[in-house]
């Protein structure tokens, strides 16, 4: 393996060479200009570099001139041409690829080159042209994308898709995952001489229309493009989150993230191999018979579950892979479950108990032979019991969230027992009734709207509700203890879309909402909170952060202490973002005054470690300290600051999606916000002949039980007064019959 040539003026940091690896130059806008080592997690596209390194390739980076008029130097071009492959990642500002620099990338780089950004290969008007491999511009994507082979007989498509489960000419699952602005695509055809190998169909973000794009396209050396004929083999491969001129997708801090599914990653690595070989797939002896590399496995699933059988083969094309099912002694072909590619999967929804014991196999053939996989047996466990109650809880006492352990029956529409208010009964005396019942999107939970508020503890009985297979609770039903969390769900700032919260047990709830940001001079988030006066200690565990259709890399689950619910309120925050390939960090921030700037508090930490992510804020006077933990027991301080938020604050947990029209949902558990109570001290004890009196300096947010004993050896203390702390000195009076001695104490409760 040759070593990349770099002039002495350039820094080269090589990873340990592997005998089967290639030398790859990764190009993107990174903080270090020119050539550098392969990078680290601070670069948003580092996951692609790591993917290449894990496959055994030797990777270095290059950040070229950002201005189109600043050309690549001869030395830079010579150094780039010592590598086996050049890849231009998506975290690259497209301005630098305009003419005349764009022409250099076409005609001066002689080694194979992959471009992953459609912005760099599009054709626009005049000087706006980039490298112009395609005939027009780009379209934004709003969905994950399945891939499709343009031709099932194309050896290049066969090689690229060999590890992608296929059905017919289309992948059974998506090529990419939704993150940030997802991606954007070239929907117009390649220039003359180029061709698409793999395409995809997606929904446009701007108007919701369907469009077809190139996922992989190739351009042989000599193809006529901007600036002259291509000096070497070129490939376009769509991948990575979309670039933008502004946060949250600004270059290079947020773009180019590795958004591929495992199947997409395998396609990407095969595309790299194909490009290194100038578009020529490895030769396969046409006389090679097919052989089963991996067959389907036996699967056991609960009734209603979905199972997927997968198998892969080796052997020369053309080949046929088809799924068969044993329907009682004979294997029969399954309709529309055939592909010519080397990996195939078949998905089956196990709703019918009669399907248990069915066997499935893959039959593979080519002109040289035919071979059957070992059959896999499907076992379906019947669902024979009614739905079980998991939790009943309320955020604020006006609604109750009820969670079941399985999907509920929705037959009957508006008359379904699932949403019949008479099937949900709060059994406490004088308890409010249930006005309406709404089935939630997960199909396993409902939200009850009440005719009046409930107390902190209640019992809920559920009758007649059935699961999706008709297993119903009886008329006597089941009862569960419920709890009202005593919190309020509010919007901080104008959210698009508006948010909501759902309680799932003591200290457990999920918060859903929009919100553009948490920071600068204003905040936007859905916020579940309570008012705390004086010193306190608040903590919460973050279980997950998800999106309704996608999620931003900077979507936040937040623990916040705020002076008010105003969007520009003074605040102290500690938050977690989504895990890799998102920002994957825990960080803290502070806004010292209303409408002021938001500043970082302490050093961010990575990785997030969801669901083992604990956040904490402690207040002592005006000093707020933020902390993090992986177990809720051992804590690490993030930062501390003196912030004059006032005697009372709103403390709670929230979520910010960071993108208008998108929901994000954060699931929390173990939320607890308790006053920090100092040990009470009694003073001014006096006896006036008939009564005893004394004073106590109280603390806001605390409750004090005043107790006495006539003898310290007595077994019990007697409580005779309760004081609600407000920060003042309060007097207590004991009117019990006199005794020779009387001893007093105060018990402080948060």
Image (cartoon, rainbow, N blue to C red):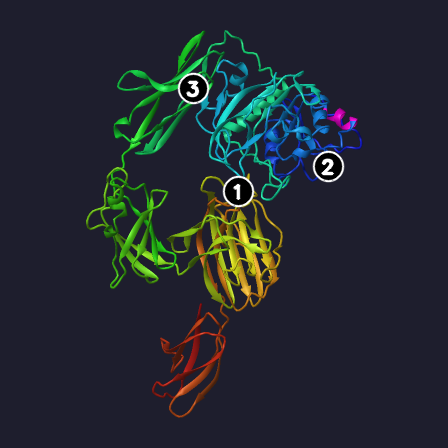
The answer to whether mark 2 and mark 3 are in CB contact below 8 A is no
Residue 738 shows in the view: yes
The residue where tag 1 is placed is 552
Name of the residue lying farthest toward the right = 8
- Which quarter of the figure has residue 72? top right
The single residue placed furthest to the front in the displayed view is 125
The earlier-in-sequence mark between 3 and 1 is: 3
For the residues labelled 2 and 3, the Cα–Cα distance comes to 46 Å
Q: Which residue is mark 3?
A: 168
- Is disc 3 surrounded by few (<14), some (14 to 19) or many (20+) residues within 10 Å? many
Q: Position of residue 654 (x, y in %)?
A: 48, 53
Quadrant assignment for the N terminus: top right
Residue 76 on the magenta span: yes
Task: Please state if 241 lies on the left or on the right of 500 as rendered.
Answer: right
Q: Earlier in the sequence, mark 2 or mark 1?
A: 2
Return the x and y of residue 702 as percentages of the image width and height: 45, 70
Image point (37%, 87%), residue name: 739
> Marks 3 and 1, how far apart in space?
33 Å
Upstream in the sequence, badge 2 or badge 3?
Answer: 2
Residues at marks 2 and 1, CA–CA distance in whole angstroms = 28 Å
Instruction: Inspect this view and state whether residue 3 appears.
Output: no
The magenta segment is 74-80
Q: Which residue is mark 2?
A: 33
């Amino acid at each position: 393996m040759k070593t990349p040539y770099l002039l002495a003026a350039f820094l080269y940091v090589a990873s340990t060479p592997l005998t089967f690896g290639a030398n790859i130059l990764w190009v993107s806008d990174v903080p270090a200009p020119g050539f550098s080592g392969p990078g680290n997690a601070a670069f948003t596209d580092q996951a692609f570099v790591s993917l290449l390194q894990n496959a055994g390739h030797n990777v270095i980076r290059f950040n070229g001139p950002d201005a189109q008029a600043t050309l690549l130097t001869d030395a830079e071009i010579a150094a780039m041409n010592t590598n086996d492959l050049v890849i231009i990642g998506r975290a690259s500002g497209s301005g630098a690829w305009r003419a005349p620099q764009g022409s250099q990338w076409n005609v001066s780089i002689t080694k194979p080159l992959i471009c992953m950004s459609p912005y760099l290969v599009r054709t626009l008007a005049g000087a706006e042209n980039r490298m112009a491999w395609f005939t027009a511009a780009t379209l934004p994507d709003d969905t994950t994308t399945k891939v499709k082979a343009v031709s099932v007989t194309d050896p290049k498509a066969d090689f690229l898709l060999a590890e992608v489960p296929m059905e017919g000419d289309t992948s059974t699952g998506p090529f990419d995952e939704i993150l940030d602005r997802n991606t954007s695509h070239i929907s117009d055809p390649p220039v003359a001489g180029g061709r698409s190998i793999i395409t995809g169909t997606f929904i446009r973000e701007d108007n919701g229309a369907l469009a077809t794009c190139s996922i992989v396209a190739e351009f042989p050396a000599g193809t006529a493009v901007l600036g002259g004929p291509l000096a070497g083999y070129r490939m376009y491969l769509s991948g990575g989150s979309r670039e933008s001129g502004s946060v949250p997708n600004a270059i290079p801090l947020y773009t180019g993230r590795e958004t591929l599914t495992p199947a997409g990653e395998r396609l990407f690595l095969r595309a790299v191999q194909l490009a290194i070989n100038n578009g020529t797939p490895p030769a396969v002896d046409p006389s090679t018979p097919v052989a089963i590399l991996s067959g389907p496995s036996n699967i056991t699933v609960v009734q209603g579950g979905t199972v997927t059988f997968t198998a892969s083969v080796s052997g020369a094309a053309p080949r046929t892979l088809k799924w068969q099912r044993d329907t009682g002694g004979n294997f029969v072909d399954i309709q529309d479950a055939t592909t010519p590619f080397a990996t195939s999967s078949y998905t089956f929804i196990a709703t019918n108990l009669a399907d248990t014991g069915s066997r499935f196999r893959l039959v593979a053939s080519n002109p040289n032979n035919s071979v059957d996989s070992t059959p896999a047996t499907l076992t379906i466990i019947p669902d024979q019991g009614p739905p079980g109650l998991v939790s009943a809880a309320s955020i604020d006492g006006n609604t109750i969230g009820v969670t079941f352990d399985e999907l509920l029956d929705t037959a009957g529409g508006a008359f379904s027992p699932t949403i019949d208010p008479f099937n949900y009964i709060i059994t406490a005396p004088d308890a409010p009734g249930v006005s309406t019942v709404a089935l939630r999107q997960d199909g396993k939970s409902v939200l009850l709207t009440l005719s009046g508020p409930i107390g902190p503890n209640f019992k809920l009985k559920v009758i007649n509700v059935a699961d999706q297979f008709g297993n119903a609770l009886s008329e006597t039903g089941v009862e569960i203890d419920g709890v009202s969390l005593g919190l309020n769900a509010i919007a901080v700032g104008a959210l698009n879309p508006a948010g909501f919260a759902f309680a799932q047990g003591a200290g457990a709830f999920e918060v859903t909402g929009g919100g553009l940001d948490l920071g600068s001079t204003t905040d936007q988030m859905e916020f579940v909170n309570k008012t705390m006066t004086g010193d306190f200690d608040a903590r919460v565990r973050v279980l997950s952060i998800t999106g309704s259709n996608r999620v931003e890399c900077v979507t936040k689950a937040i623990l916040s202490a705020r002076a008010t619910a105003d969007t520009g309120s003074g605040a102290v925050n500690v938050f977690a973002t989504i895990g890799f390939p998102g920002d994957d960090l825990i960080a803290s921030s502070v806004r010292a005054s209303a409408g002021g700037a938001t500043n970082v508090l302490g050093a961010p930490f990575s990785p997030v470690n969801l669901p083992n992510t604990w956040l904490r804020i402690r207040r002592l006077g005006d000093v707020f300290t933020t902390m993090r933990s992986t177990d809720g027991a051992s804590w690490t301080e993030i930062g501390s600051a003196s912030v004059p938020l006032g005697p009372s604050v709103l403390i709670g947990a929230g979520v910010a999606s960071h993108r208008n029209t998108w929901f994000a949902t954060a699931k929390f558990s173990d939320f607890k916000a308790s006053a920090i109570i100092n040990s009470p001290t009694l003073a001014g004890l006096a006896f006036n002949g008939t009564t005893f009196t004394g004073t106590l300096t109280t603390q806001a947010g605390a409750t004090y039980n005043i107790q006495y004993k006539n003898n310290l050896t007595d077994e019990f203390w007697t409580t005779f007064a309760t004081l609600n702390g407000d920060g003042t000195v309060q007097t207590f009076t004991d009117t019990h019959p006199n005794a020779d001695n009387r001893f007093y104490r105060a018990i402080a409760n948060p």
